[in-house]
């Protein structure tokens, strides 16, 4: 089940490409269903009616949002649809200005059970600032919602995601319990992970992504629960990290777990002033609730190939694995990570594998 999730709360999201809808596609304009531009009247029910018509069309259809500013509450666009559907917007869609306007919903806009879906154009302004201020003030803020959730959906390309670098716990794209997801051509700036891959994720291909500011691309956190699915067969290639906290990271809680991460490839990666360019951290325990525990998550067959650029810190490669489940099959090939004015180093704990080609800093495997 390919799932595209755009959590956590309220990103400003715009899709870059604006291809014209194919002339053979039936057009359902939300304005014909009563939607009024101007961002004051709620357009949710008009969108639902337009969707119902587009989705029940026997031939390919387009739900079209003309230029303007439309206010939407939680919107679930459900399939299955009879034919392919394009959601094409030239508008700015706005969430309620205060986060409680979404009630208890954990999403703003969600596509459920829709196959052959394309989402094209438009700006999605989920107006997260009231929620972020609430989180920053450490009061108990209800919920938090995903800006966009796509389930059973494909063909989401050229996505640009922007959230302020101070936005707490706001991942760009989070993929979990999903198989066969691809992310291409994305530019992601945020306050947490640009892309994170959670438990139960398989066969993911990530290509041509620009990440930063943000926390990098992360597999994990894994091992949060004792019984957990693993992560397997992940390829990340052609990514540029700029000023990020991490580059490519695998992290697991220091707890017992059935989780694992294996057959992971990071290649053709450029780091620009990244704090932890290559990092495995199996001692993750931010709440200190892991006394004397080691991670049960087995990490194996992880390859780093053609990774170059600059590290903002001396330790450019840090591989901290579990004492009870040491990492094996790590491979470093053609790594060139330098830092202005200092010699970079590697640090390993319980990490096994091989280095080949030119490897700077010197391998600790
Ligand atoms: C999605 O479709 C499946 C089968 O077609 C159905 O069992 C499920 O209830 C649907 N889910 C939603 C949320 O519509
Ligand atoms: C691994 O994932 C890729 C997609 O990135 C897929 O094409 C390939 O078939 C997968 N390999 C296996 C063994 O499942």
Image (cartoon, helix red, strand yellow):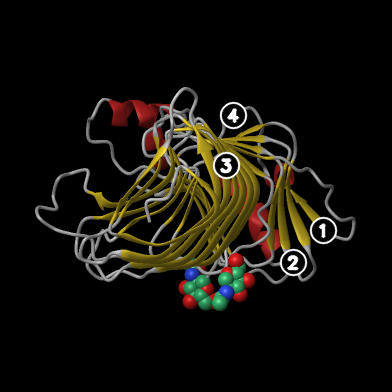
Determine whether 83 is above or below 335 in the image: below
Q: Which residue is mark 3?
A: 308
Q: Can residue 307 be seen by looking at this rendering?
A: yes
Contact check, label 2 and label 1, Cβ < 8 Å: yes
Query: Which residue corresponds to the image point at 67% horizontal and 53% vertical from the top-left?
Result: 50
Query: Quick one: label 3 or label 4, which is nearer the N terminus?
Result: 4
The residue that mark 4 highlights is 39
Camera sees residue 200: no
**Closer to the N terminus: mark 1 or mark 4?**
1
Residue at disc 1, secondary structure: strand
Tell me if mark 1 has few (under 14), some (14-19) or many (20+) residues whose alpha carbon lies within 10 angstroms of its own: some
Query: Real-space Cα distance between discs 1 and 4?
Result: 26 Å
How far separated are the C-alphas under marks 1 and 3?
48 Å
| Quadrant in which the C terminus is drawn | bottom left
Kindly identify which residue carries mark 1: 26
Q: What is the CA distance from the residue labelled 3 to the residue labelled 4?
A: 46 Å
Where residue 284 appears, as percent x and y from the top left, is: 26, 49
Q: Nearer the viewer, residue 148 or 210?
A: 210
SS label for mark 4? loop
Q: Which comes before the other along the chain, label 2 or label 1?
A: 1
Residue located beneath label 2 in the image: 57
Q: Nearer the viewer, residue 336 or 121?
A: 336
Report the image quarter containing ligand 2: bottom right
């Amino acid at each position: 089940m390919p799932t595209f999730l755009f959590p956590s709360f309220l990103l400003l999201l715009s899709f870059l490409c604006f291809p014209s809808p194919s002339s053979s596609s039936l057009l359902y304009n939300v304005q014909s269903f009563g939607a009024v531009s101007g961002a004051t009247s709620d357009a949710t029910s008009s969108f639902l009616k337009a969707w119902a018509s587009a989705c029940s069309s026997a031939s390919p259809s387009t739900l079209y949002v003309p230029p303007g500013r439309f206010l939407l509450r939680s919107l679930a666009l459900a399939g299955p649809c009879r034919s392919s559907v394009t959601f094409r917007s030239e508008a700015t869609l706005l969430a309620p200005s205060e986060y409680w306007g979404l009630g208890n919903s954990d999403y703003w806009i969600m596509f459920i059970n829709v196959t052959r879906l394309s989402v094209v154009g438009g700006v999605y302004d989920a107006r997260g600032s009231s929620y972020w201020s609430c989180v920053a003030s450490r009061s108990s803020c209800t919920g938090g919602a995903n800006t966009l959730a796509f389930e059973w959906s494909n063909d989401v390309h050229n996505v640009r995601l922007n959230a302020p670098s101070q936005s707490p716990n706001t991942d760009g794209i989070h993929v979990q319990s999903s198989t066969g997801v691809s992310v291409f051509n994305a530019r992601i700036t945020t306050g947490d992970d640009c892309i994170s891959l959670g438990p139960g994720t398989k066969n993911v291909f990530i290509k041509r992504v620009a990440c930063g500011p943000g926390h990098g691309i992360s597999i994990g956190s894994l091992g949060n629960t004792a019984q957990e699915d693993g992560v397997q067969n992940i390829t990340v290639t052609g990514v540029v990290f700029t000023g990020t906290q991490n580059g490519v990271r695998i992290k697991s809680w220091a707890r017992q777990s059935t989780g694992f991460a294996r057959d992971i490839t990071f290649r053709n990666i450029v780091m620009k002033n990244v704090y932890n360019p290559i990092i495995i951290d199996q001692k993750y325990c931010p709440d200190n609730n892991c006394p004397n525990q080691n991670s049960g998550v087995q990490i194996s067959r992880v390859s780093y190939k053609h990774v170059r650029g600059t590290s903002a810190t001396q330790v450019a490669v840090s591989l901290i694995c579990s004492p009870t489940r040491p990492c094996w099959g790590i491979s470093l090939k053609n790594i060139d990570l330098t830092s202005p004015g200092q010699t970079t180093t590697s640090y390993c704990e319980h990490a096994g594998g091989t280095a080949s080609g030119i490897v700077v800093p010197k391998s600790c495997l």
